[in-house]
Image (tube, rainbow, N blue to C red):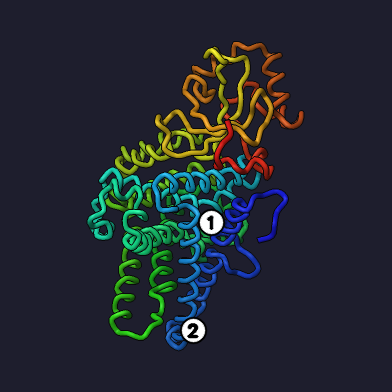
Amino acid sequence: MKESPYQTHYTRQVNYLLAKVSKQNAVKDSLVDIAIEYFQQEEFHSDESRKNQSLLASTQRNKRYSSLVSIALTILELVEDGSFVENNRKSSQLLGTIQLLCPTEGMKVAKTNEQSKSIYKAVLCLRLLDQLIISDEISDPYVKKFLTDVSPKQYLNFATYDIIKYDRFNTQVKVPLIMAALLQDLGNYHPSAQSILLGSNGKLNPFRTLDVIQRKALLQINYRETQKFLIEGIGIPTFIGNTRSARQEFMKDEQDKQSFIHTLLKTSVNPKKSLGNILKVPQVYTSIVLSTKNSYDYKLLPQVYQVLNKSAELGACCQVFVDALYKITGMFPQGFGVVYMPSGEFGEQSDCYEYAIVNALYPKKADEPNCRMTTRKLTFIGYGQNNTIKINSNLYFTATAKKISRLSKERLNEILTLLSSNSEERQKLDLLPRCWHANQFFSVKANQNLWNKSES
């Protein structure tokens, strides 16, 4: 990757990964490109010609498989380091970076969010799995068999406790879980699905609200074609080795992984209390935080759990999984711009507000996010300290906003002048903001180290 004057090495890595998964390109080597090519081949070839091309098909399957596994391993490497604490820090960094790279206003919101969803969702799936294991709420026999003699406490530092079991767990459980998250909506790129999304002339807005019949048809096509892509388009990779016993072990492991992915995809459609919730709940969360709807409103992102709790109430997903994800993320998504009233030296409320960005998972209280300060004395800084924003300081909450509304209009205008980069931006901003759009701040390379050791 070339050195960028605008991005840190890490931000470039994330951009590259996003492109590798979901951005169509001239080389046609992204995961979306690979799926589109497969679906088009399937439409074009007859059953007879498929049989005659079995050797070529096997080579293509192996290429698709290795491409998917390579992406899954890259994601795992970016968000895991063997310990629960470090896994959460790295996951917060990836989730927050994705959020801050996505525009929150304008024409590109839907498309960029769509391209970012599967990786974001995959990270949430991993952290949700961890939380369910440490709270001893995993009953799935496939997952449990790889955790024999590993207690929830030992799992917190799994790599240190037993590196062999840790690697095996990653290979047989975590990588397939990521693969399932990446595959889940690929069926939408099948020509039949695209004709619903884009219309027969290919010119309709794919992000428009579909009617009930169209939506049902799309869900059925997506599910059917995703499963077909998994089983026939990817399949079981070719064994490379000499011994019969090694081949048997390899085939057993690969069949188990494929079966696990298949089950996750199948049960996520109507998960009830099954492990399918581990895909479904992050899918719903991601569809709101990285929404592609016309009604997308950045200010409403912290209300994501109102939707998830309602879904659980209606039986569309399981409350245990919703509660577990809430414990991990809290109310405010990673990378969200928080506006708060700082306290003075003696605890008194100041006469201004400041900006911060949510930068860590597992807040002690769900409505009090862990943040990195991004302004001090109404000046932007790239080296702020970490802090927890209490409810009585956070302008997102109406009661707190009322406190600062007592300030004069002149003072609020003065603050806005200092915190906005130009008069055009200032005209669009609320005089009393409940949150702030941090993308422009993050676009400066020096401001992209929100997850390094903070300075006090």
Residue 433's disc is: none
The residue pinned by badge 2 equals 56
List x then y, in percent, for residue 422: 76, 31
Can residue 447 be seen from the camera position used here?
A: yes
Between the residue at mark 2 and the residue at mark 1, the CA separation in whole angstroms equals 31 Å
State the residue in front, 147 or 213. 147
Classed neighbour count for the residue bearing mark 1: other residues with Cα under 10 Å, few (<14), some (14–19), many (≥20): many
Residue 197's disc is: 1
Question: Looking at the image, do the residues carrying marks 2 and 1 touch, with CB atoms under 8 Å apart?
Answer: no
Q: Secondary structure at mark 2?
A: helix
N-terminal of the pair, mark 2 or mark 1, is: 2
Residue at 60%, 11% (x, y): give it: 406
Which image quadrant: the N terminus? bottom right
Residue type at numbered disc 2: Leu
Residue 434 falls in which quadrant of the image? top right
Residue at 34%, 66% (x, y): give it: 257
